[in-house]
Every structure is written in C-alpha cells, then in structure tokens.
C-alpha cells in the first residue's frame, strides 16, 4: 500500500513539473507574439513589383530572426516603386495573417554595389604559373 501511495505522489509530481514547463513555454510564445512590430535594416537584392516582394540581405532583427537573405511581401506594393538593387533600407515587419509583411520601407541613403561572387576554381591554389 505504501508503494502505491509513493507511485501516486511521484506521478503527481511529474504531472506538476510537466504542467509548469508547458505553461512556461506557452507564456514565452505569447510574449513573442505580443510584439506586433519588428524593425530591421538591409540591402535590396531584388525587387519584384508584380509579386509585391523585395528580397533583402538583412542584418539580425532583434527578438525575431537572425541575419539572412529573404524575400518579404510589401504592403502597400507602391512602396517598391522607388527601390533599386543595392539600396540600403530600414523596414518594419508586422503580422498579416500567417505571414510577416513589410509595412514601412525607407531608404537610408546609402547605395552599395551588389556583392560579387567569389569562389576558388577547383584545383587552383591561388598562385600563378
């Protein structure tokens, strides 16, 4: 009988710990979703006015995502009209349905040339013959 009571206490303890962990996880997710706008900066890689998207090489967006190259929908699409490849921009993202959309897009005034692809040819050690 004492063994059965100990098992019940252990089971209750495990359930309590599991519940506490689940609640903590849910609160963390709610806090992340509570922030409805994130700001970032990046360089324009491509503009697709027909699709309403801009592809950016962006730096880290604190609290949201790491630095990467990514295409974003832009609303309203008219914000794309003055952009050119190489422009650096500051932007704000907001959730629109299941997607995050750029809602403000401002050139910073800097213009960088597109990066050149650089790779070593197979078998080439960097020295000329």
Image (tube, rainbow, N blue to C red):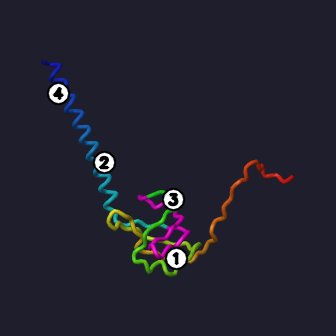
Instruction: Please give the range of residues in magenta.
Output: 41-64
Q: Is residue 11 left or right of residue 71?
A: left
Q: Is residue 113 left or right of residue 56?
A: right
Q: Reading the chain from its start, which is encountered first: label 4 or label 2?
A: 4
Residue shown at 40%/73% (left/top)?
Answer: 103
Q: Nearer the viewer, residue 78 or 93?
A: 78
Q: Reading the chain from its start, which is encountered first: label 3 or label 4?
A: 4
Location of mark 3 (residue): 67
Q: Of all residues shown, which one is farthest toward the right? A: 129
Location of mark 1 (residue): 107
Percent of width and height locating residue 86:
59, 72
Q: Quadrant of residue 99?
A: bottom left
Marks 1 and 4, how far apart at CA: 63 Å
* Category of crowding for the residue at label 1, using alpha-carbon neighbours closer than 10 angstroms: few (below 14), some (14–19), many (at least 20): some
Where residue 25 is drawn, which disc sits there?
Answer: 2
Tag 4's secondary structure? helix
Location of mark 4 (residue): 8
* Category of crowding for the residue at label 3, using alpha-carbon neighbours closer than 10 angstroms: few (below 14), some (14–19), many (at least 20): some
Percent of width and height locating residue 60:
49, 60
């Amino acid at each position: 009988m004492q063994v059965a009571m100990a098992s019940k206490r252990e089971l209750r303890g495990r359930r309590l710990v599991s519940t506490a962990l689940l609640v903590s996880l849910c609160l963390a997710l709610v806090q992340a979703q509570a922030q409805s706008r994130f700001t970032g900066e990046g360089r324009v890689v491509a503009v697709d006015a027909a699709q309403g998207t801009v592809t950016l090489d962006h730096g880290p967006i604190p609290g949201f995502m790491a630095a990467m190259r990514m295409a974003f929908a832009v609303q309203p699409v008219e914000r794309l009209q003055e952009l050119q490849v190489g422009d650096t921009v500051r932007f704000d993202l907001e959730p629109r349905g299941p997607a995050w959309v750029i809602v403000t897009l401002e050139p910073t005034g800097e213009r960088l040339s597109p990066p050149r692809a650089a790779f070593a040819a197979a078998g080439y050690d960097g020295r000329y013959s």
